[in-house]
């Protein structure tokens, strides 16, 4: 529905970085519509296609790969990336051999550098792009996984321009799509049920001057659609002290331009003093008030999930603080985590009602590709 449509920021960033590297040597087009993409491809055959895969568009992407092979055979290079790509070599082999057997390669973790490394080989007229290892890329050669040196989460965000400010997102902003803004990358928490939990790295922020320009640019573009929510794609907004400054910029945009009237973000799981300041500043815009996602309080389930929660005292303090500002408080549970029982789950719900949460959301555990909990040894 209209409430779950967002600009394709992820592929926009891949395109932005590639254009920075190769300039006029490449032409880049972005698509969310499969039909529009296939029609355009028939008119103007692509050399390289990159597909961002998550669980809700897996079948759609498999369809696109099959159609591209029917149309162009091996003349097109097809690259798969996204949250579903695991860092585990056995999972990568499975993806290349059974999930996307007609794709050429996978990009692991952040996609900008790995994708550009492939483009560099294509532009160099390499006879066989996928023969020798490529940094940040995995592919099959004679049914053996060839894994290039790992890049992890190493992109210097100071070198990463903005797909908003360069105009790459303009087409999608003139529509019903909600804007996504990312001000930092990486989640320091290692939850085994989350695609981010498998990553190890360093928390990095984009240059704050660029973030400010992005926020102003997006706000001006959405002035005529004030009902559209601005979504922050940071996994823990409020984890960096500078997030207070960013919150102030968002608040100023709302007052200066009349947008955004509504902002959605997940606050830092620890809900520190910085998190409180961010929520205070955005009290009028924040869509869901204070979110204290517990997921589970079963000790065995927490251990199995590599997760730690707030203490009872911290939860009570945060709820009392939020109510003092007339903000709603909500929590989220995952139903069906390892070792969770009917009794432990109902007990947790009862406690959260007694604590005074305004909203409780329950989501069943999704065993997605790309999470540690979905790996065969973990499931066993």
Image (cartoon, rainbow, N blue to C red):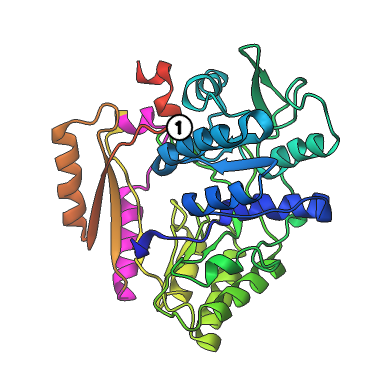
From the viewer's perspective, tell me whether residue 8 is left or right of residue 295. right
Range of residues picked out in magenta: 301-326
Secondary structure of residue under mark 1:
loop
Query: Residue 356's quadrant in the figure?
Result: bottom left
Residue at the image position 77 percent from the left and 50 percent from the top? 26
- Asked whether residue 317 is drawn in magenta, I would say yes
Query: Residue 19's quadrant in the figure?
Result: bottom right
Residue at the image position 68 percent from the left and 32 percent from the top? 75
From the viewer's perspective, is residue 298 above or below residue 272?
above
Quadrant housing the C terminus: top left
View extreme (bottom): residue: 256
- Asked whether residue 302 is drawn in magenta, I would say yes
Residue identified by numbered label 1: 371
Query: Residue 336's quadrant in the figure?
Result: top left
Q: Which of 30 and 331 lies nearest the eye of the viewer?
A: 30
Q: In the rendered image, is residue 74 in sight? A: yes
From the viewer's perspective, tell me whether residue 364 is left or right of residue 110. left
From the viewer's perspective, tell me whether residue 325 is left or right of residue 192. left
Q: Position of residue 188 (x, y in %)?
A: 54, 43
Q: Which of 53 and 293 lies nearest the eye of the viewer?
A: 53
Q: Position of residue 103 (x, y in %)?
A: 58, 29
View extreme (right): residue: 124
Residue at the image position 64 percent from the left and 23 percent from the top? 139
Q: Position of residue 320 (x, y in %)?
A: 29, 66
Quadrant housing the N terminus: bottom left
From the viewer's perspective, is residue 269 above or below residue 127?
below
From the viewer's perspective, is residue 361 above or below residue 58?
below
């Amino acid at each position: 529905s209209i409430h779950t449509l967002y600009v394709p920021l992820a592929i926009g960033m891949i395109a932005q970085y590639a254009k920075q590297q190769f300039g006029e040597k490449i032409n880049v087009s972005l698509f969310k519509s499969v039909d529009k993409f296939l029609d355009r491809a028939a008119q103007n055959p692509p050399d390289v296609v990159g597909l961002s895969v998550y669980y809700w568009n897996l079948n759609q992407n498999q369809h696109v790969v099959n159609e591209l092979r029917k149309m162009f055979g091996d003349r097109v290079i097809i690259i798969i990336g996204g949250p579903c790509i695991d860092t585990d070599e056995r999972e990568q082999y499975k993806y290349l051999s059974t999930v996307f057997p007609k794709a050429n390669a996978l990009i692991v973790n952040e996609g900008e550098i790995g994708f550009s490394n492939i483009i560099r080989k294509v532009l160099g007229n390499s006879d066989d792009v996928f023969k020798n290892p490529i940094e940040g890329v995995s592919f099959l050669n004679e049914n053996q996984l060839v894994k290039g040196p790992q890049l992890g989460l190493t992109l210097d965000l100071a070198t990463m321009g903005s797909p908003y400010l360069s105009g790459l997102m303009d087409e999608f902003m003139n529509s019903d799509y909600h804007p996504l803004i990312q001000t930092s990358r990486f989640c320091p928490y290692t939850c085994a049920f989350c695609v981010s939990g498998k990553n190890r790295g360093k928390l990095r922020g984009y240059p704050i001057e660029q973030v400010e320009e992005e926020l102003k640019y997006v706000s001006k573009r959405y002035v005529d659609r004030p009902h559209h929510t601005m979504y922050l794609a940071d996994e823990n907004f409020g984890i960096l002290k500078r997030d207070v400054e960013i919150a102030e910029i968002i608040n100023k945009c709302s007052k200066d331009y009349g947008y955004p009237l509504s902002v959605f973000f997940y606050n830092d799981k620890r809900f520190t003093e910085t998190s409180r300041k961010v929520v205070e500043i955005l009290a009028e815009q924040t869509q869901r008030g204070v979110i204290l996602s517990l997921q589970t309080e079963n000790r065995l389930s927490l251990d199995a999930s590599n997760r730690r929660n707030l203490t009872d005292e911290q939860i009570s303090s945060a709820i009392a603080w939020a109510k003092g500002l007339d903000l709603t408080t909500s929590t989220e549970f995952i139903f069906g985590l390892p070792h969770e029982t009917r009794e432990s789950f109902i007990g947790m719900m009862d406690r959260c009602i007694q604590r005074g949460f305004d909203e409780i959301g329950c989501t069943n555990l999704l065993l997605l590709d790309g999470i540690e909990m979905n790996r065969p040894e973990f499931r066993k």
